[in-house]
Image (cartoon, rainbow, N blue to C red):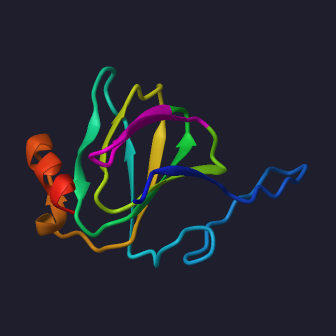
Amino acid sequence: MNYAKIIHLKKIPDSRGNLTAIEQLGDVPFEIRRVYWIFDVPGGERRGGHAYRQGQELIVALSGSFDVMTDNGHESDSFSLNCSYYGLYVPAGTWREISNFSTNSIALILSSTDYDEADYIRNYEDFMVYARND
């Protein structure tokens, strides 16, 4: 069974400013097909609230902080992301919700798939049926 987990990304310190790079099939266990980010989230709002049948993701707090709740149908967990050189790996078949966005936070998401609405499970009860049958 796959579980969400924190991946420590390489931080290259420099007196002029630090650098972190992410390489597909090295730092993340998938080929990166899509990159998007979430920003300007109003106070109290949540993002996500869905699972992917095939898509895997790496979620990074580029700026600020937020919490990510994950659920694979058997076990749930919560992660606080607030460091730009830690990423949360979210395997396929995992429900996820992002909440508690700080002011000016930016969530960077790297995805293993192109956008495909058919890959989404947007209803939690449908997700639980899917997770039990997977």
x and y, in percent, of residue 25 in the image: 56, 78
Vertical arrangement, residue 15 with respect to residue 19, above or below:
above
Residue 76 located within the stretch drawn in magenta? yes
Compare residues 36 and 7 and report the one nearer the observer: 7
User: In the image, what residue occupies the spot 66% across and 50% down?
Assistant: 85
What percent of the width, then of the height, locates residue 70? Answer: 37, 42
Q: Is residue 33 left or right of residue 63?
A: left
The x and y percentages for residue 74 are 31, 44
Question: Where the C terminus falls, by quadrant?
Answer: bottom left
The vertical placement of 108 against 80, above or below, is below
Residue, far right: 15
- Identify the magenta region: 66-82
- Residue appearing at x 42%, y 29% in the figure: 101
- Residue at the spot 33% in from the left edge and 63% down from the top edge: 92
For the N terminus, the quadrant is: bottom left
User: Where residue 27 appears, x then y in whole percent?
Assistant: 62, 68
